Image (spheres, helix red, strand yellow):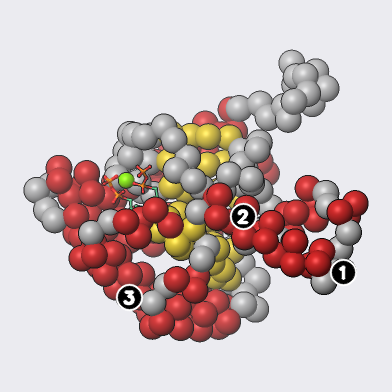
Amino acid sequence: MGIMKEIDPLRLPQHIAIIMDGNGRWAEFHTLGRILGHREGAESVRIITKTCCRIGVHCLTLYAFSVENWLRPEVEIRALMNLLLQYLEDEAREMMDQGIRLTAIGDLDSLEAPVLRKLQETIEKTAGNPGMILNLALSYGGRDEIATAAKRMVGDALAGKIAPADVTRELFSKYLYTTGIPDPDLLIRTGGEYRVSNFLLYQMAYTEFYFTDILWPDFRETDLLTAIAEYQRRERRFGMTSEQIGGR
Ligand code: IPE
Ligand code: IPE
Ligand code: MG
């Protein structure tokens, strides 16, 4: 595993977010139905989660289903929900063994009852685990997240719990689904598209973006390590000069 030597374990991205795209095209390429692409994609989820855990990433957020994905054909939605349920059933044991703490972001109430129940059960079961946070974005939309946060904040204001002057970006962050989770350091998008597709809009203000043509079912350990190595070659300036942040 040569690429591992290129990675500085002290400068790992603490939080990696991934837009897992390209399952459908992978299936098409292999002349299989889209559903089989999603199934193979679930295998990448297992491998990438394991790798992140092993190398010491603190949080991994996976974009598994967007609010816009509800517009897909009914059969595909059903298959994705079944795969999610199966994934949760199969992986609970592994999450306990690896000390993974499962969390989820999105409009979770829109998930069907058996999926939501299993999700909540796994979240509760793993809540005390000390290891990596595996954060699943399900029925997630960035704009919806921001609007929902605003709605709850207005509610608190009307209830007299907060005043307009209290509203800062720190306070606002607390109303987002991601409260308590640091902003992503690295965003990876597979599948060759160069867009954010309504993912973590507020949180990605200073995230490093990495795009690859590799389709999600083909994205495995070496590809992840390659992305991390590239991340480590970047200079994050946060608006400052290179000199200020101790660069050139
Ligand atoms: C990503 O793969 C998985 C989900 C969006 C659920 P796609 O299903 O979007 O694959 P492509 O983009 O059609 O290849
Ligand atoms: C983004 O992929 C959502 C997920 C990976 C869950 P899409 O395939 O839905 O995104 P678009 O439609 O190409 O922007
Ligand atoms: Mg897609």
Q: CA distance from mark 1 to mark 3?
A: 44 Å
* Residue 154 found in image quarter: bottom right
Q: Where residue 93 sits: x, y (%)?
A: 44, 79
Q: Residue at x 75, y 19 (%)?
A: 242
- Asked whether the residues under the numbered discs 3 and 2 touch, taking CB atoms below 8 Å apart as contact, a structural biologist would say no
In the picture as drawn, the residue positioned furthest to the front comes out as 158
Whether residue 231 is visible, yes or no, is yes
Whether residue 178 is visible, yes or no, is no
The one nearer the camera, 129 or 68, is 68
Instruction: Please tell me whether residue 179 is drawn above or below residue 208 in the rendered image.
Output: below
Closer to the chain start, of discs 3 and 2, is 3
Residue type indicated by callout 3:
Gln
Q: Residues within 10 Å of mark 1 (few under 14, many from 20)?
A: few
The residue to which callout 1 is attached is 160
Q: Residue at x 45, y 71 (%)?
A: 110
Image-based side of 11 in relation to 162, left or right: left
The residue to which callout 2 is attached is 147
Q: Secondary structure at mark 3?
A: helix
The one nearer the camera, 81 or 131, is 81
Residue type indicated by callout 1:
Gly
Q: CA distance from mark 2 to mark 1?
A: 20 Å
Q: Where residue 182 sits: x, y (%)?
A: 69, 52
Residue type indicated by callout 2:
Ala
Closer to the chain start, of discs 1 and 3, is 3
The residue to which callout 3 is attached is 86
Q: Where residue 75 sits: x, y (%)?
A: 20, 65
In the picture as drawn, the residue positioned furthest to the left comes out as 31
Mark number for residue 214?
none
Q: Where residue 32 sits: x, y (%)?
A: 11, 53
* Mark 3 vs ligand 1: CB below 8 Å: no
Location of the C terminus by quadrant is top right
